[in-house]
Amino acid sequence: MSATPAHPLRAAGLMLASTLCFGVMAIAIRLASTSLHTFEIAFFRNLFGLLAVLPLLLGAQRAELRTRQLPKYFVRCLIGMFSMLAGFWALGHLPLAQAISLTYSTPIFVTIAAVLFLREHVRARRWLAVAAGFIGVLIIVRPGSAEFSVDSLAALLAAVLGGVIAIQIKQLSKVDSANTIVLYTYAFWVPMSLLPALFVWQWPHGITWVWIAAAGLFGTGGQVLWTHALKLGEVSALTPISFTQLPLVAAAGWLWFGETLDIYTVIGAAIILGSNAYIAHREAVLARRRASAASTAGAVPGE
């Protein structure tokens, strides 16, 4: 049986579209944060996100939307909620380029989480890439300097928790379909994010509705496009395309918020992105080796 053919150009287009969606979501969150609390932004992002995925879920098979992993979904969504709140806080209080640069450190923590929770074996070269990524993070955050901000720790917390979430999704996907994971994620996220929002509640006014709706719609669109891109292409080839989000949000920060891109963020981001690219490349190489070994082991002699 032949493998599903790759479509590199289509995959690249989907990844670029996904990256632009995530960039617009980040800008919308920043704009909404000028008049709305982070807790409320998270709630409305989830609410509008749920509305956006409903047409996809309604077309799914009923059996596909059943699960026996509800406790695992609850834990995954609780951790995801803290990650979302931390990330949204960073987008509202840090320069956009700095906040996005720190979120790119997530693959570093995915590697560490894979070792801790999945007992994956990581060789020296990937550990060196992880160490390089940490150096990039330290260059951006600059602990102990006058420029250090607790808000940077919020972005870093979002990245750490994002690494744990990636492992949880990997475990859930062994049993449940992507549609099932999306359904239960939003089913938990909407009430979970509503609870803290009620303590700071004030109704959005005017154009703020546009920003929170855009955050939900573009965030969900980015997730869907990202998933389809990874089905059609290789992670190592697509990961560099996702880095185009950084100049997009940096330009938006300069044009709309008067933010400047400091040299420390540029250097740190370059190191983190290089680390990510190498980790993605090694993951792709190892995945191909495992697939080849499984194919060889499953072959019937004489065929």
Image (tube, rainbow, N blue to C red):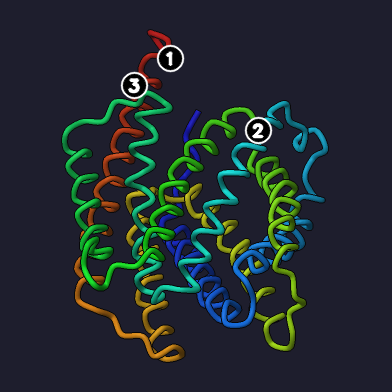
Please indicate whether residue 136 sits to the left or right of residue 108 in the image.
left
Q: Nearer the viewer, residue 64 or 68?
A: 68
Residue 269: tell me if it is visible. Answer: no
Between marks 1 and 3, how big is the CA–CA gap?
A: 9 Å
Q: Which residue is mark 3?
A: 293
Image location (x, y in percent) of residue 201? 74, 70
Residue found 31% across the figure and 29% down from its top: 289
Image location (x, y in percent) of residue 253? 41, 83
Image location (x, y in percent) of residue 276? 29, 52
Between marks 3 and 2, how big is the CA–CA gap?
A: 25 Å
Residue 256: tell me if it is visible. Answer: yes
> What is the secondary structure assignment of the residue under circle 2?
loop
Residue 33 to residue 63: above or below: below
Give the number of callouts. Answer: 3
- Label 2 vs label 1, nearer the camera: 2
Q: Residues within 10 Å of mark 1 (few under 14, many from 20)?
A: few
Amino acid carrying label 2: it is Asp
> What is the secondary structure assignment of the residue under circle 1?
helix
> What is the secondary structure assignment of the residue under circle 3?
helix
Q: Which residue is mark 1?
A: 298
Q: Which residue is mark 2?
A: 176
Q: Residues within 10 Å of mark 2 (few under 14, many from 20)?
A: some
Residue 107 to residue 255: above or below: above
Image location (x, y in percent) of residue 261? 28, 80
Residue extending furthest top?
301
Circles 3 and 2: CB atoms closer than 8 Å: no
Residue found 31% across the figure and 85% down from its top: 260
In the picture, the quarter occupied by the C terminus is top left
Mark toward the start of the polypeptide (3 vs 2) = 2
